[in-house]
Amino acid sequence: MMTGRISTGHHELDTVIDYLRPGDNVVWQIDTIEQYRQYANRFVDYAAENGHTVHYIRFGSHSPVVDTDRHPKLVEVHTPDSEAGFESFASELHQIISTIGRDAWYVFDCLSDLLERWSSDLMLGNFFRITCPYLYELDTIAWFSLMRGQHSYATIARIRETTQLLLDLYRIEQTDYIHPLKVWQRYSPTMFLPHRLDGEKCRPISSSADAAVLFSSVQTRQQQAERQIDFWDRLFLTAEQAADLCQDKPEEDPYCRRIFVRLCGLLIGDEGRIGELAQHWFNLSDLIEISRRQIGTGKIGGKAVGMLLSRKITEEVFRNQESVQAEPHDSFFLGSDLFYTYIVHNGWWKLRMQQKSANGYFNSAEKLRDHLRSGEFPAAIREKFQQMLEYFGQSPIIVRSSSLLEDDFGNAFAGKYESVFCANQGTPEDRAAAFEQAVRQVYASMFDESALAYRQNRGLDSRDEQMALLVQRVSGSYHGSCFYPWLAGVGHSRNLYVWDIRLDPHAGMIRLVYGLGTRAVDRVDGDYPRIIALDQPRLSVHSSREEEKVYSQHYVDLLDLGNNALCTMELKELQKRCSTDDLMLAADTDWESVRQLRELRIKSTPPPIINFRAILQEGRITAALQMIIKRLEQAYEWPVDIEFTINPGMNGDYLISLLQCRPLQTKQFGSTINFPENTPTDNILLQAEGGFMGGNACITADTIIYVEPAAYTVLPEQDRYQTARIIGLLNNILGQNKQAGKIMLIGPGRWGTTTPSLGIPIKFSEINHINILAEEAFETAGMIPEIAFGSHFFLDLVEADIFYLAIMPHKRGVVYRPGLLTSQPNLLADILPAHSDYASVIKVLCPDRNFTLFSDISSQKLLICQ
């Protein structure tokens, strides 16, 4: 461990600052690299004379600071990649410093060069805030430099606060002047005066006249420098000036085009298909407008980009519509750099690095997640939050995840990160506190177990995953003390669940609800959205009026402004509490129940049946949505998945708000499947029409896990949860055993339900190795499958390439023989001896004659047989 005092290589400068001490970080403010090079090499010479190695951290595009030829054996050069971005660069450097260890001496390239890579003073300040303390802990000596006039006052203040020494170096008329601005834990009567450097002499300028002349010259030079605002803001000011100069066609001007390409890379990204789409559809004015609504710096993330792209691409579609218009948006974007700023500001960077390691990926995540839910934001950021909330007033808003990897081709991250509604009622202080907590909650969701497992399973665990945020005004209107949109839903440009031979899979579908769209994107227990094929919108999934009534929407998600919260309300309660004039535009009166109540002389009005019959018969909305979805598919050159709301406009027209657009994670329908002929009836496990998702398929199941419905339904609730955990264990064991082959899982009701009375409360990570997933209806216990096409659950199945089917034994024409399963030997006790007491409920089967699934989209035939 180093002790005592260490020289800078300049004896009289040592006297001024009382030498260097172990742990010192020295920051030089300079006008040219040559100035820094001169004094850095004197330090290197001193180190070499004393046999001490200097580690040169080389990352800049400028000429080298350290002359390595002078002391080749005592200078080690390290080249972390600053082009890879803040987190990768900081992580790589952290590893270099850790490997070198204690008592090391460093010279860094000029930090200002990082602005050319990151374009953000905010991130430069973050880098110094995490690197400087770590060097201090290891008792190192480290030299840094900054170009004067290129950084914001806030950045210089953060660096001054963190470093041990801050030295201003001026060169005026071939003479150097050094002015110590900060020398930690040292003091002398002349230490903080400017000093004139004459060769080896270093004399304080104590005369008031000489000092006035010097600082007058310095001030003039500073005034000639650029305004000291964040580099990011300077870039966009330059963009605005360029756009003004090239008002006619800025996209055709080479200068404007260069600026556009750079800003597009900074805000959106310039890699992959999404980057190409952004450069094709956006213009310089679009990017400037985004920047005006951005808080912080960095990219706006996948969800925000998808929303903006979808609106840009469909502008022409809406222009050609007379009675269906686009609802404008006034969203704000919290840049991805704020995520790191939040972590650095609260001192959690070490924990973040631990979580990035192989051992800490899951183990450190819970602690980091807990921290993220309770941190503080920098005062400057909180002020910007407040300004945004003043803009929205008391309008409800939603804080949505918009991570860098989200909504990209190949990785939907559907439902993996949180979105938080803010009813946004109460005092300004209350609303600010609620908003900040919503931001914390979304940040923390990055480290939820399901999100971590998703990234790991898709090989993304080593990629930088920053969380940007999209803050949107909630689309909808006031209904008394409640707020919600009239209609909301998701739409797909491909229909993988064609339940009727008349349907075209390429025509698309929507999943529609009344109220907030949470009931459309999530698989909601005990409730059913309306699935609509866009080529046959009037064609119902249900075969009878009674089925349509049972399998329809009975609850509405909304914002209860009185209670300042998101809530779910039963239709009957909603009609009592709120103005629901628009409800009957989406529903039919339940005349059968009305008649029955009258006959019983009961004075009560039954809730209506939400079936959207009138809307579907009129056809304007479905026709417009089909055009929108197809236009997006054409632009993306790939099937798409959208989220939207619909509200009544003026003069009987409709307003459609596109909230999200992403590539649909799907697979091809597959070639035509040849079904076996003359299959003996005794060998058929299941024969049905419709009720499956997975395209044309021929899959042989080597292993079957079967949850016996009658046995499961008599279990106490705790044992039902335990059943799910045991299946999760089987999923992991069999999924890693090649001899288990392909796996079919069959169980009663809904997989993944949160209500054990409706199915099996399993997590998706506990069924991710399954190849065929079947939900079996067990009506006597109220366990009914739900074809979850369009939901986050469905997208998980598609991404995991899991074939889904619903078994409806009660439906006409369905053949189902579960006895073929229950007659097989149960291997549960052999695989999991500790859980053999569940053998009557869970059966693990490896039949001598395998079962093969055959499916055909065009005919809607499904067969599972031996």
Image: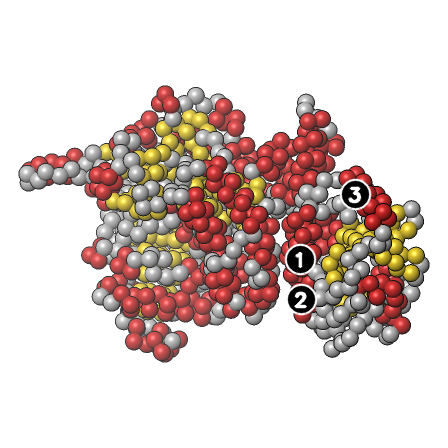
Q: Which residue is mark 3?
A: 219
Q: Nearer the viewer, residue 791 or 718?
A: 718
Q: Which residue is mark 2?
A: 134
The N terminus - image quarter: bottom right
Who's the residue at 91% across and 60% down the image? Answer: 201
Which callout, 2 or 1, points to the residue nearer the camera? 1
Q: Which residue is mark 1?
A: 161
Q: Secondary structure at mark 3?
A: helix
Rendering coords of residue 99 (x, y %):
71, 71
Which callout, 3 or 2, points to the residue nearer the camera? 3
Which callout, 1 or 3, points to the residue nearer the camera? 3
Rendering coords of residue 510 (x, y %):
39, 39
Q: Secondary structure at mark 2?
A: helix
User: How far is mark 1 from mark 3, CA to CA?
Assistant: 23 Å
Q: Amino acid at mark 1?
A: Glu
Q: Amino acid at mark 2?
A: Tyr
Who's the residue at 6% across and 40% down the image? Answer: 600
Who's the residue at 38% across and 35% down the image? Answer: 476
Q: Is residue 654 above or below residue 554?
A: above
Asked if residue 446 can be seen in this view, the reply is no
Asked if residue 707 can be seen in this view, the reply is yes
